[in-house]
Amino acid sequence: MVPACRTLDCVSVFALNVADASAVLDCASGFDERDAYSRNIACDERAVRRLAVPRPQDLLFFSDRAAAGAWDAAIGQLSRCDVHIAPIDMSPFFAVARLLYEGPWVAERRAAVGRFMDEHAAAMHPVTREILDGAARYTAVDTFNALYRLQDLRRAADQALAPFDALVVPTAPIFP
């Protein structure tokens, strides 16, 4: 993985089943003393019994009926397992996403590709270039205010997830 925002990025694992995800976790987990942002994260070996899912109004499929159907089928399968499934408010998670793509972290993303963008901006995807060009409009004050907001959102997300063992979300739909 090459981080775009070293202060925030984490590796996402997409797996077809729990065994595959566990195998990836075994390979990827562990503290790396050469990485200033590496953290020791203890993995709880208990069985996953309590699953959080987005509330219906928080599901975004952008008219992709196949993605919506796949989500419904997956939730149907999970509901037949020995697990408790409950919806949670995804608002704090969406707010964090907006901070990442519409806030001062755009400047950190710009820093990650700085030299490349300076030399090859025309070769970049126009949407990516447009997002990164917006980095200059943020000040240090904006960044600190966003850090404070992020911490508030982190607390809200932690509280929302506290009763659960895992958060299950749909994958990205195909945009029409």
Image (tube, rainbow, N blue to C red):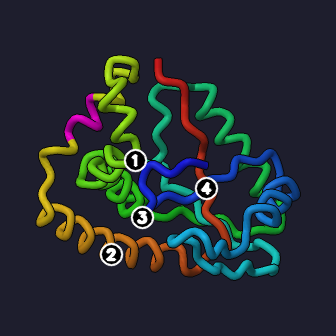
Secondary structure under badge 1?
helix
Mark 1 surroundings within 10 Å by alpha-carbon count, few (fewer than 14), some (14 through 19), many (20 or more): some
Instruction: Based on the picture, tell me whether residue 98 belongs to the magenta stretch.
Output: no
Residue 149 image-quadrant placement = bottom left
- In the rendered image of this protein, does residue 26 appear above or below residue 97? below
**Residue appearing at x 54%, y 31% in the figure:** 173
Q: Amino acid at mark 4?
A: Val
Question: Real-space Cα distance between discs 3 and 2?
Answer: 13 Å
Residue 142 image point, x, y percent: 14, 61
Q: Nearer the viewer, residue 169 or 71?
A: 169
Question: Real-space Cα distance between discs 2 and 1?
Answer: 23 Å
Foreground mark, 1 or 3, reads 1
Mark linked to residue 112: 1
Mark linked to residue 7: 3
Magenta residues, dominant SS class: helix
Secondary structure under badge 2?
helix
Q: Amino acid at mark 3?
A: Thr
Q: Nearer the viewer, residue 139 or 79?
A: 139
Mark 2 surroundings within 10 Å by alpha-carbon count, few (fewer than 14), some (14 through 19), many (20 or more): few
Question: Real-space Cα distance between discs 1 and 4?
Answer: 17 Å
